Structures are given as C-alpha cells and as structure tokens.
Image (cartoon, grey):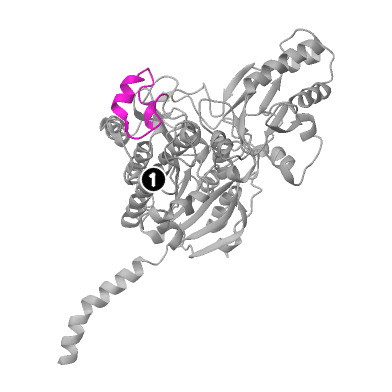
Amino acid sequence: MRRIILLMVLMPFFYTSKAQTSKKIPSEKPTLIVNIVINQMRYDYIRRYWKDFEEGGFKKLINEGTLCRDAEVNYLFTQSSVGQASIATGTYPCYHGIVGDQWYNNLEERTVFCTEDQNYKTVGGSYEAGQNSPVNLMATTFSDELMLSNYKKSKVFGVSLEPNESVLSVGHTANAAFWFDVDNGDWVSSSFYMDSLPDWTLEFNAKKLSETYLTRLWEPLKPQAENAESWAENDKFETGFRDNATFPYDLEKMRKKYNNNRQYELLKYVPFGNNFTKDFAIALIVNEELGKDEYTDYLGLNFSATQNIGSKFGPTSQEIQDTYLRLDKELAHFLSFLDDNIGKENVLVVLTSTSGVSYTPSFLQDSKIPGGYFNQYSAITLLKSYLNAIYGEGDWVKFYHSHQIYLNRQLIEDSNIKLEDFQSRVAQFLIQFEGVANTVTANTLHTRNFTDGILEKIQNGYNQKYSGDVILNLKPGWVEKSDNSTGTNSSYKYDTHVPMIWYGWKIKRQKINRQVEIIDIAPTLSSLLDISFPGAAIGSPIIELVE
C-alpha cells in the first residue's frame, strides 16, 4: 500500500519531467531559421560592451551557442546591400552582381538603385517606396533553395527598415519582403510579392507605433559618467543630427524642426528604429505562424538603424554604445519570445553583420594616428579637367560612386581611343591623391586572376556587367567625405571583421577560432538541412557545425 501511495504521489512528477524532457528534444530539422543581420556591427563591440549586456541577449547567444571569432568579409565594397546579397547567396559580388547600393548603367545612362524595379508598384504606401524586387540579383539564395526543395511549402519573409536589405536577404521566391515607408510611417511591400497587404499588417500599421517611438526622449540607459567603454561626448568628432550631437535628443522636437515630406525618416537614425523592426518581426512570426509545421520556415531579420547611428556618431561614441545596449534588450526579448512560442530546440538563429566601420578620421588624427577624409568631389573635378586637357573637351566621366569611376565608353570609342589605355591614364592620375592607396582598372580585373591581398578582395567585388572602369582603394583610416562622421567600404579589418554567432537547434556551445567568411553561412544552412547549395555559392560549410 505504501508503494502504491508513493507511486501515485510520484506519477505527476514523472510525467511532468518526461514532458519537459521531450519538449527539449530538437526536431529533425529546425522549424524556423532566423538570420539576424546587424548592419555595421564591428566584432570588438562584443568585448567592449560585454559587462553591460544583460544575460538574455548577446550573452545568451554566445554562452549557449557557437561564436566564430574570426568571421570575415572578403571583398572590397562593404556596403549593406553587398553584404546582404553575399550572406544570402554564399558568394561574392563578382557572381551575385550586387556590387553596391547603387551603380551606373551605361546603356541607360543613369544610376540604378540595386533593387529598383519600375515594373512593380508599392503595396500599402507612397508611390516610389515599393518599386523594388530582386531583379538585379544574379544568383539564388539559401531561402530560394529551401523553397525549391519542398515545392514552396516553406514560408520565407524578409524584414528591414530598408527595402534593399529586406529584398536581398530572401531572394527571388520569398512570400514577402517588408520595409519601412518614411512618407507614411507604415510597413509596406511590393507588387512583386502581393497585390495587397495582409490584414495583420494593416492592423499593425493602424497602431502607428512609428508615431509613438518618435515622441520619445533618447537619453542614455547608463549614466554617461560610467561609460568608460566610450569617449566622452565630443561633437568635434561627430556629425550627429545637424546642429545636435549630444544627449538628450527630444525626437518630437527634432522631427518638427526638420519636418519635410519624409517625416518619419528620423526613426531610421535612432535606436527605436530597431525596436520597431523587432516589434514587426514578432507580429509576422505570430500571424504567419512561422515554425509551426514540419516544413522549415525562414526569416531574414535586418537591423539597419545601427549603421545610420554609427555613421553619424562613430564607433567610440556614447550614442553607439547606448544603441547596442538597447539592441541587446530587444534581442533578449526576441529570443525569449522564440523560446516561449516555438522552442529554442526548434529554432536556429544566425547573427552576423554586413560590415564593421572605421574609427572617425578626425578622432584618429586627434590621436596622432593616420587617417583622413578623401574629397572625391575635388578629385573628380580635377580628373575631368585633366582629361579635357589631354583628350579635348568632352564628358569623359559619367559617374562616380563609392570608389568607382564610370567612364563615357561611347565617347571613348567614338574618339578612337583604346579603352584600356584610357582606364590606365585615369588610374595613374588618381593614385596621386592623398588618401588613395590603390587604383585598379576594369581591364586588369577581368584579364588577370589574383589569389591574395587587396587585389583579390577588389576582384571578388568586381562584376564586369555592373562595376566601374576604375576602382579606388583608400588608405587605412580614410573614408570618403560626406555628411557622416565616418563610414565603411574598405578592405581593412575594422570593416571586414564581423560577428558570427549560431544559436538554438542542435548548436553546440563552442568557439571557432579559425577564419570563416560570411559567404559560408548559406552553404552551412544548406548542409544542415541537406538541400542544394545556392547555385553560385563558393563558400564552404562550417565543419564544426555540420559534423
């Protein structure tokens, strides 16, 4: 009788324990993959802000997952669009075709935004906000291969404040990509994906959280006097918000002061833009029921406000520190949501970045370290004058953007000048400018093969169809002159060394010290799911994760 009574008492605990144990057994395949991309996140931010992170965000990812300590971007132009495409396709710009956020189209004689597609219209927003598609992406993505593997039974979505990031993160076959319309403050999409927004998106937009976030006061979570990880606020190193580069920032007043047609744009330049992105991602997961059946779903979740803030204030600023402490809290909330609603054992999370960022050149100069601002406007003006003196009056230079010079090939051909000779003369002229480390011609890049060093990185980022005629590489610590304090777009470690963290479904707790690349993410995911690699992928599966 005593044994029977004891068994009856213990039975509920036995079944509860068994249920809890079975709940933690990973599914055969992850039911949801979330690829989190934090724009312009330097790897050293992890160490710099570690003691101020809470337990549920970055610390949870690293302490319970796999940290790749030497993840690299192995091409020159470390722009957000290029990074998104490289992560998604597992290959370099020379193959996937996204050589920059924009480029010059010689045939049409105009600049082209990387996801611009006038064949489609906006769904849910202002006229031009939604004219986007993956039309210029030349390769399949991991999520494309996932959809092809099961006849589109998976559900695939992209989310970002920026259209190019959302579109490129999920490729050609996604159910939808959503982004933020700065004209009306809503989440919108393109008719490439749908004819009308889902009801749940309309309901989310009706809450007008963008309005709510823009009434906030942005002041530091941690007292500034205790922020030893950042330099004291000094606006001589920071562009900030026009005439304001010190805490606190009254967003409602700022919005009214700088009011224009893009009245919600400020949200993209403050940490609350990341909050807003996370809020929408959770609503999407719940309403689209991601991770709820046997087919693996995929979410490309992109945090882009970090890049805008980092460019305005620089990586040593109080503002960028506060941004990452706030993002850490949002990640903690998001991970807790995934665990509660789908289960850590069923969700695979990958976190990485499209690039790092340079120290502010004025800060470097003040610290007696080489650095500076390359004045591309003066350089191109002088180049045009030089070419006119050599070849006669003419519109020899069509376009300059992000270290790339596009020449007037038709005029050069009509003038019976060999294109490769013209390119070489331009390259030789530009190498003389202060801040320029290397100049390389397109002819050199598509007639020779480089296997290491800066020329390999330049070649990895060069696409014969879309790239310029002459490419510049600046010296370390140098960035282009702009309205920002600093920027990215170089081949140096501060730009190319990024975080890569794997967490959740069947992921071991470990650190990988050897070098991996962001183009290894797509092949690794394909190996874990035992599906085809993206067609142009040249990255390799990370062995420590797939063994």
Q: Secondary structure at mark 1?
A: helix
Q: Is residue 106 visible?
A: no
Across and down, in percent, residue 31 comes to: 42, 55
Q: Is residue 202 rendered to the left or right of residue 484?
A: left
112 part of magenta stretch: no
As rendered, which of 411 and 256 lies closer to the eye?
Answer: 256
Q: Is residue 536 visible?
A: yes
The residue that label 1 is drawn on is: 327
Q: Magenta residues? A: 243-267
Which residue shows up at 42% across the image and 37% down it?
Answer: 233
Quadrant assignment, res 3: bottom left
Q: Is residue 356 rendered to the left or right of residue 299?
A: right
Which residue shows up at 81% across the image and 38% down it?
Answer: 448
Three-letter code, disc 1: Leu
Q: Considering only vertical position in the picture, is 11 above or below 403? A: below
As rendered, which of 275 and 203 lies closer to the eye?
Answer: 275
Which residue shows up at 42% across the image and 54% down it?
Answer: 58
Q: Considering only vertical position in the picture, is 325 above or below 172? A: below
249 part of magenta stretch: yes
Q: Considering only vertical position in the picture, is 479 above or below 499? A: above
Across and down, in percent, residue 460 comes to: 69, 40
Q: Is residue 159 rendered to the left or right of residue 432?
A: left
As rendered, which of 430 and 446 lies closer to the eye?
Answer: 430
Q: How many marks?
A: 1
As rendered, which of 5 and 163 lies closer to the eye?
Answer: 163
Quadrant assignment, res 496: top right
Q: Is residue 9 rendered to the left or right of residue 351?
A: left
The quadrant of the image that shows the C terminus is bottom right
Across and down, in percent, residue 478 comes to: 62, 34
The quadrant of the image that shows the N terminus is bottom left
